[in-house]
Amino acid sequence: MTKFTDLGLSEAILRAVSKQGYDTPTPIQAKVIPAMLDGRDILGIAQTGTGKTASFVLPILEKIIAAKKQAVGKTCHALILAPTRELAAQIADSVRTYGAFAKISVATVVGGARPGPQVMAMKRGVDVLVATPGRLIDHCDTGVIRLDRTHTVVLDEADQMMDLGFLPPVRKILSKIPGDRQTLLLSATMPKQIKALASDILSDPAEISVSPVSRPIDQIDQRLHMVGQLEKRDMLIEILAADDVDRAIVFTRTKRGADRVCQYLDRAGISAAAIHGDKSQGQRERALAAFKKSRVKVLVATDIAARGIDIDDVSHVVNYELPNVPEAYVHRIGRTARAGRSGVAISLCDQGETSYARDIERLTGTRLLPDGVKITPPPKPGQRATRGNQPQQPGSRRHRDTAPGKPVHGKPAHGKPARDNQGAANQGAGKPAHAKRADTKPALNDNAQRKRRPNRNRRPQQAAG
DNA sequence: AAAAAAC
C-alpha cells in the first residue's frame, strides 16, 4: 500500500502530514499528488470528505519548495480559487497546517474583510494565495497583486466556479496567469457543460475520479416526505425535535427563506442561526462558529453552505426546499455522514418540487419519491407575480394545495445500495485538519444593518392591462 | 432560476 513517504514529498511536508496523524494517502491523494508532481493538468472529480484539499495542497507546497531553491523573489507561486469566503478560509488553514515546517507564506484574499491587511501580506510576499474571485480582481486592478509568475492554479468546486455568473471573473483572473501554468479543476460533481468548459481551460488533463460521479455517499440515509407547502414548518419542527437529531443543517432555496425559517425555529424554541450571502461577514462567521461550538443546534443556510464546508458531527441535513439544480442536492447532503460516520438527509417536497425531486433521482440513481406521486412542472418563471406582466389566471396560483389533509410520509428510499466499506475507509487522511480560527475578533455591530424589503407585499401593477 | 462573489 502506498504511503505518503512513497510519493516523493519533502521532509518538511512529510513531517507536517505525520504530525496530523496521517501516513496513508486517500485514493484521490494517491492519484492527484503524483500527477501534479508530474506537471499534468488535472480534472479531478471527488466527493467531499475524500481528502480533496490535501491532495492539491501537498504537491503545491512541494513545487514551491523546489522553485524556491532556484529563484528568490516575492512572487505568488500558487493561486487557489474558491467559490465562498468560508471555503477559502478553510483551505488557507489547510495550507498553513501542511506548510508549517516549510516556511511557506499564505494569504487569504476575500471580500467582506478589510483590504488593508491583505495588501500588507502581499507586499511582504506570498507563496500561496487563497482567494475568492471578486476581491482578487480588485487587488489585481490596483496593482497590489501580480500573477505573472504564478505557475499553479487550482479551481476548487470547479462546477460552481464555472457557473455562468462566476465564469467571467474567473476567466479574467486566468488571463493574467502565464499560459504555461499548471491548472487543476476539482469538483464533487461535473455536469456536461462544465466539462466542456473545462477542456477550454485545461490542456491534456489527467482525469481523476475516485468515486462514481454524482452518487451521494452510501452512508447517508436519504428520506423524502411529500408535504403540502403549508405543512412544511410543522413538519420541520417535528423532525428537529426528535431525539436523534443532534446537530442539523436546514437548507432553503432563498436567503429570505433562510431568515424566515430561522426566526420560526427560534420562536418554536429550537436554537438556530442563519447563514447566507446577505449577512455581513461578521454575522456569517458568528453563525458558523455558534454552530460548530454547538451553541445552536440548527444552522439554517442557503447553498452558501452546501459545498465544502467541513463541520463534524452533523447528524441531519434537512432540505426544507429542494434545490432546482440537482447537483446542489449532492453537495448539501454531503454535509452529513462525514469522515466515515453515518447521517440522515430528509427532504421536504411539495407538489411544485416534484420535478426537482425527479431530476435528483435521475442524477443520483436513488429512489426518493414515494410510489404514485404525480410529477408536475415547477411554476414557470413567467407566471411569477414579480414580473407583473401576467394576467393572473385563477389556476396558476403558486401554492396549489395538493395534498389536502395529511401529508404523505415517505419511507426511507428504496433500492438503497447496501452500504459497503468504500467511503468509510477514507476517514483518517481524508479529514482536512482545520486549525481553529481565531475567534477573538471584536464583535462588529452589524445587527443594525439588517435589510428590510418593504416591497414584499406590493401587488404587480405595471403592464397588467 | 437562485446564490455566490467587489467596493
Image: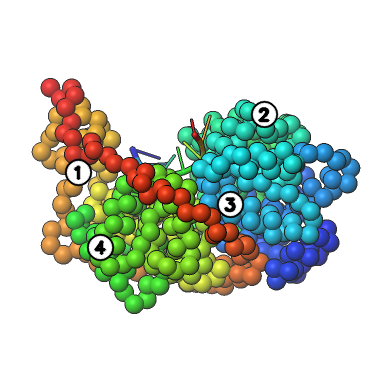
Which of discs 1 and 2 lies nearer the camera? The answer is 2
Residue type (three-letter) at the residue carrying disc 3: Ala
Left/right of residue A238 with respect to residue A305 in the rendered view:
left
Which of discs 3 and 1 lies nearer the camera? The answer is 3
Residue type (three-letter) at the residue carrying disc 2: Gly
Query: Could you give the CA–CA distance between mark 4 and mark 2, rounded to whole angstroms?
Result: 49 Å
Question: What residue is drawn where x is 74% and y is 31%?
Answer: A148
The residue tagged 3 is A89
Placement of A384 over or under A59, stated as above or below: above
In the picture, which quadrant includes the N terminus of chain A?
A: bottom right
Left/right of residue A108 with respect to residue A253 in the rendered view:
right
Observer-nearest residue: A454 or A276? A454
The residue tagged 2 is A143
In the picture, which quadrant includes the C terminus of chain A?
A: top left
- Closer to the N terminus: mark 4 or mark 2? 2
- Closer to the N terminus: mark 2 or mark 3? 3
Chain letter of the residue beneath label 1 in the structure image: A
Question: What residue is drawn where x is 58% and y is 59%?
Answer: A437
The residue tagged 4 is A267
**Mark 2 secondary-structure assignment:** loop
Left/right of residue A260 with respect to residue A394 in the rendered view:
right
Q: Are marks 4 and 2 on the same chain?
A: yes
